[in-house]
Amino acid sequence: MDTLLSNDPRTVIEADRAHVWHHLIQHKPFETIDPRIIVEGRGLRVWDIKGKEHVDAVSGGVWTVNVGYGRERIAKAVADQLTKLCFFAGASGTIPGAQFARRLTEKMPGLSRVYYANSGSEANEKAFKMVRQIAHKHHGGKKSKILYRDRDYHGTTIACLSAGGQQERNAQYGPFTPGFVEVPHCLEYRAGDLGGEGYGERAAQAIEDVILREGPDTIGALCLEPITAGGGIITPPKGYWQRVQEICRKYDILLHIDEVVCGLGRTGTWFGYQQYDVQPDIVTMAKGVASGYAAISCCVTTDRVFEMFKDDTDKLGYFRDISTFGGCTAGPTAALENMAIIEEEDLCGNSARMGEHLQMRLNEMMEKHACVGEVRGKGLFAGAELVADRSTREPLPEKQVQAILADCMAQGVIVGASNRSMPGFNNTLLFAPALIATKDDLDQIVAAVDGAIGRVVEAG
Ligand SMILES: Cc1ncc(COP(=O)(O)O)c(C=O)c1O
């Protein structure tokens, strides 16, 4: 074999070091240490190129591989489909595209149309474009503003960053797209005097205050994560979602829920919003839709939204958008198998049950270590916010949080943390293992963190 194409670890590492620009990481350290290269996965374990085994508590680093690694039936279905028809542009349909759209909307009562794309950012861009076009077609150009929330993240493109509530993600990438307006977060632990009885209603009221300030006739949509993910695993306070829904209805504002992380069983139901009994107008999703076996994202809407684009008088009145790779058949084919696995193995149920075990274990850790300030989450999606001082809630410095992750990594356990997101508040450990996780897996993950905290915070 051409030595340049050899799988020999040293050759691969040097090729990577010399030519790959990795995502979201500073490359200076790679001048002296090797970049990490992952070569194989099975269940919720992965192996790196040096042969080391890791328990993956974050489903591929960014909460994606919901059904776990090594699912041959997905690979086989995709291979068969690719041989038959790999791609056709989305102005036409395909068999897996039609079938998955039907199966998906069966899980989402009240929603009926699926627009295919290939990343979470792109799905959110589609939603933003729909809202803008509705403003032009139906509101004389008004109602074009889109509200987003402090600490939420909706993707990496300039428009998505414009809707991004994580200042460190945005820094140095302006100027941003106009027409996006921020509303406050709903993290009671960081709400100061606003917290306490009735906080959920007050946090929602803060959204209404922004709407009234901006003018309800200028606002087209409110875009929220059901549970804020990278912004610190923020489970909404009691009463929040009900009030948010009422506010959206009162001012005819479309509710766009970003399920890119929470979708497909992560929180113990098919979608995160289903935990809170809300009815969105637009739902976007990506990561767990095909668990990373193929690239696919979906922007799902109600009939009402869809019908607003039907028109036989305005030549430009339909949704004039395309995503070339939204026509790849690998995505919906993998997504069909992924959904069948979640159903057959009751992975939503497992996520809910194992999520309770994970919360219990993390709460025990909080009793043991003063630096664990709060534990949050739902299903197999959990966060532990770390503090330097429990009484003042001063965040644990990011360096120490990162040292805890490094210690876990050395133990062969991959844990996440909010990072490069909120200045001074990148202090929440994140857990989102594959939905197949067992009690033993979770105990191993929490034991690694427990040991790391002891070494980094208490002994250090
Ligand atoms: C809530 C949320 N929305 C959107 C995105 C963007 O998805 P992608 O990276 O596939 O563009 C992410 C990525 O982490 C996310 O967490």
Image: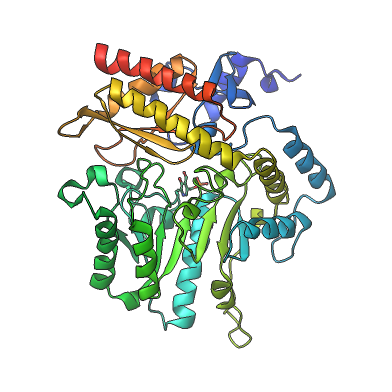
Relative height, residue 119 to residue 88 (above, below): above
Relative height, residue 179 to residue 288 (above, below): below
Q: What colour scheme was applied to this rendering of the protein?
A: rainbow
The mark tally for this picture is 0
Quarter of the figure with residue 101? bottom right
Find the residue positioned furthest to the bottom: 313
- Name the residue located 35 percent from the left edge and 29 percent from the top edge: 363
- Residue 432: x, y in percent? 48, 34
Which image quarter is the C terminus in?
top left
- Name the residue located 51 percent from the left edge and 39 percent from the top edge: 352
Relative height, residue 123 to residue 16 (above, below): below
**Quick one: 55 or 424, which is closer to the camera?**
55
**Quick one: 296 or 353, which is closer to the camera?**
353
Which image quarter is the N terminus in?
top right
Q: Is residue 263 visible?
A: yes
- Residue 147: x, y in percent? 35, 63
- Residue 338: x, y in percent? 67, 43
